[in-house]
Image: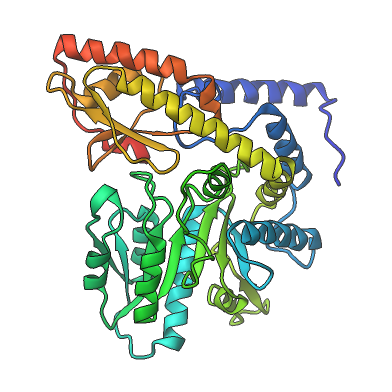
Amino acid sequence: MPTPVVLADQKAREKWSDIKAQLQAMKGDDCDWAEGKVPGYTYKMGDDLDYVIRESYQMYFGENALGKNAFKSVVKLESAVVDFCLRLFGHDHTGAGIFTSGGTESIFLAVKSAREWAKRNKPNVDKPNIVMPVSAHAAFGKATYYMGLESRRVPIGFEYRADLNQLREAIDENTIMIVGSAPAYAHGNFDDIGSIGELAEQHGLWLHVDACLGGFVAPFAKKLGYPIPKFDFTVPQVTSLSADLHKYGYAPKGSSVLLYRTPDHKEYAKFVFRDWPRGLYQTYTFLGSRPAGPLAGSFAALNFLGEQGYINATRIMLSIKEKLISGIEAIGGLRVYHPSDLIILLYDSVEAAVDINAVAEEMRKRGWFIGVVANPVAISFPINPIHEKSVDLYVADLRSCVEIVRKSGKTAAYDEATYT
């Protein structure tokens, strides 16, 4: 392991001091995530874990995860992380997985795997399409766009969950894959993965479950007694599942897993190239060179927190959720959407004089990052443990902002740039 560098040279110290000042100045307009003012994007479970992750990341700062022959420890790290995740999601050593840079890459590789699988198992498919609820993550749209596949997004039904009839009607002889969310990002509710699995089996389809958002919450909420539906490999038709470690796994940014039911399914993600002077080039990921730091940080997070740590984090978040619900519902003119399966909370206005977009605008003036869902137009609050310190202030500011909007009659346009 490299020896930590100490800036003994005066000129080096001066240069770093200047660079550091520039970096700090650039952050001046950022929302203060460390004080819990950013629902979404950042996820934190204590200063001790942050320290462990940073130290682990630093140990692998220079290693390239592409070079598995040079850095054999990277292979061990990835195997350990994948094995932990397979067990968490109802599988065993007969499964397989890939560590990726995030949910988008995990979803991209799942779609690519299904496409290659269909070439071998559905030779009569002419123009492959993928069927999914409109609530499926935008990354599926990105993946199908890049790969030239048809994306069939169908309306959702009751409680903002996948509509089985709509999915069924969209399937035809060219369908290769069907998608369900556990839960979906926009509304925070689970699709009925068991019923979607039966649909996949009837039509011989690859079933992918997007658990990027709630994958590292749902199993622990279930242990706490919450009614979490089956969504993982305990549903026998699930072919692949994605889950983001850098969300509620509290790992460094750039950490996700794509898990497969069998090693054979994983092989469809592989890219092999020999037509150049260097020789064999082979990867399972979209990226070539990959930072090993996120992998080391993920390994550290999983082992430092362990099952009990994740259970405690989940207990904290569900407590925050109840506090938010009671606080928001006590503010006249606002309505919380029910049910809310896990850790995404939506609320809107039921009073004509209280424009919810104007409320969001007022909250932003107070330093909060506020995301607004397009359909229905509502404010979204993805909860994580750091909000334990800010939930009271959030409710107090919200109450004040509602009153400002009510008295002023202010309105505002929907801000579609809250997830860019």
Image coordinates for residue 243, horizontal then vertical, percent: 53, 54
Image coordinates for residue 378, horizontal then vertical, percent: 26, 34
Residue 82 placement: quadrant: bottom right
In the image as oriented, which residue stretches furthest toward the front?
225
Establish if 141 lies above or below 339.
below
**Camera sees residue 289:** no
Q: Is residue 301 left or right of residue 347?
A: right
The residue at 55%/76% (across/down) is: 265
Establish if 207 lies above or below 407.
below
Image coordinates for residue 375, horizontal then vertical, percent: 23, 43
Quadrant for the C terminus in the image: top left
Residue 306 placement: quadrant: top right
Q: Is residue 405 left or right of residue 301?
A: left
Establish if 288 lies above or below 333.
below
Q: How is the image coloured?
A: rainbow
The residue at 41%/65% (across/down) is: 194
Q: Is residue 143 left or right of residue 9?
A: left
